[in-house]
Amino acid sequence: MVSDRQTATYEPAIVRDAVFYVERSLSKDGDLLVRAGDRVEPGTELASAMVAEGRPLLLNIAREFDMEPDAVARYLTRPIGSDFEENEPIARARRGLRSVTCKAPVRSTLTALDESTGVATLTPQSLPQRLLASVYGEVDSIIEQRGVWLRVGGSRVQGVLGLGRDTFGTLRVAVDRADRELTADMIDSEFRDCIVLGGMTLGTSALRRLIEVGARGVIVGSVSDSEIRRYMASDEREPSSMMLWRRQAGDFQSSSPLTVFVTEGFGRRRMAQPVYQFLTGQENQSVSLLVPNDADVLSARPTLYLSRERPGGDDAIQRVTVRDGTLARLVDPEHLGMVVTCRSGIVDSAAYTGVLRDVVDVEFSNGSRHLVPATSLEVLIY
């Protein structure tokens, strides 16, 4: 049984000329530097705190040196509580005719040694964390010791995947079609401090070229898992897909100076034409890319803002219903980023094990039609 039903509304991925409330917060308690009512711009510092560069690290020195755990303490180069620079020896011993060392992988403090296991604990040293507004807006309210809610006027584009840190810069268009790949030879020094609009995708050489010229971010329709793994490789070792995509978004923020904003998903998928057309019309405008850092990479959906210096009125985001002809994309893992055309509103269907479920009849680019869960749908624009 299929019956008409329209109970859900959608917040479009592209929203023009509205007012947004954007949370900006530290990862731990700190000092706030602004007050409610203050106007801010992207480079305004909102708050600061001392934050460790990462989680505590465990080093099994006994195993590295092939010795009894209770013997490790005598081979430490400095006592518990000492600070070590990256690659500085924590412990040193003789093995036959050669000297072996165990080095600190990052700048850290030796905070403990378990003599029953020979495992040392290293705590990454704290560095000042500066929380920037990253957008134009006005401080609407204060989050005690953590940050603020900003009232932001302008436009917004929702992405599906973000790698890197919050950033902002002038939008520059690098390709002339939504289905064109951004290659290294298209990138020059004019992209320094800019957010670069690519097309369908880009590879490792283009990513590294963007870093070389000093670009702050890049926007593409899709990315290849293998290209990102090569880009993130260290010491010639390439992380596995499982290791890479199980990381938290914050891990990418500390390891890459470039923010990658993906609008559709994995593979080689062209950027949705409405997204590409909208963004090309904003060239030379100030763009902000915000990537949540408190969730795993695949669920930390990034947001692009084109913010105005003055928030303006109170035009809230208009939620919309789907109907025949509505352009949307799918956000379920199997079809992530696929652009479809809706051929119905939301309907009830008993196609799933006899249980009624909200679905939408959609048409794929090859002309095939399927019922998909209403929760897997994201309206692109209204």
Image (spheres, rainbow, N blue to C red):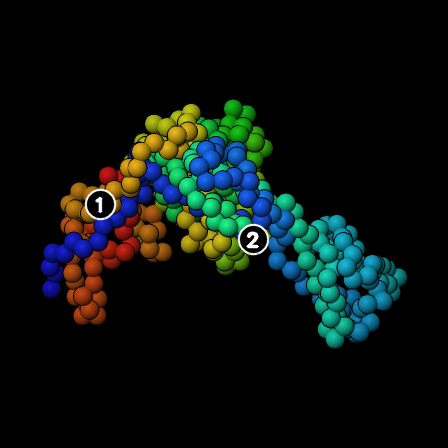
Please provide percent x and percent y for residue 7: 18, 55
Q: Pointer 1: what residue?
A: 320
Amino acid on which the number 1 mark rests in the picture? Val
* Distance from the alpha carbon under mark 1 to that under mark 2: 37 Å
Q: Quadrant of residue 19?
A: top left
Q: Nearer the viewer, residue 333 or 109?
A: 109
- Where is residue 43 drawn, in percent x and y? 52, 33
Q: Quadrant of the C terminus?
A: top left
Q: Residue at x 34, y 31 (%)?
A: 312
Visible in this render: residue 263?
Answer: no
Residue occupying the point 84% across, 64% down: 75
For residue 28, the mark is 2
Q: Is residue 108 visible?
A: yes
Q: Quadrant of residue 155?
A: top left
Q: Which mark is residue 75?
A: none
Kindly identify the amino acid type of the residue bearing the numbered disc 2.
Answer: Lys
Residue 214, x across and y down, in percent: 56, 31
Nearest the viewer among 37 and 53 is 37
Q: Is residue 155 left or right of residue 101?
A: left
Q: Is residue 272 left or right of residue 145?
A: left
Task: Give neighbour class at mark 2: few <14, some 14-19, many 20+ (Cα, 10 Å).
Answer: some
The x and y percentages for residue 118 are 75, 70
Residue at screen point 52% across, 34% down: 44
Q: In the picture shown, does residue 224 fall above or below 169?
A: below
* SS category of the residue bearing label 1: loop
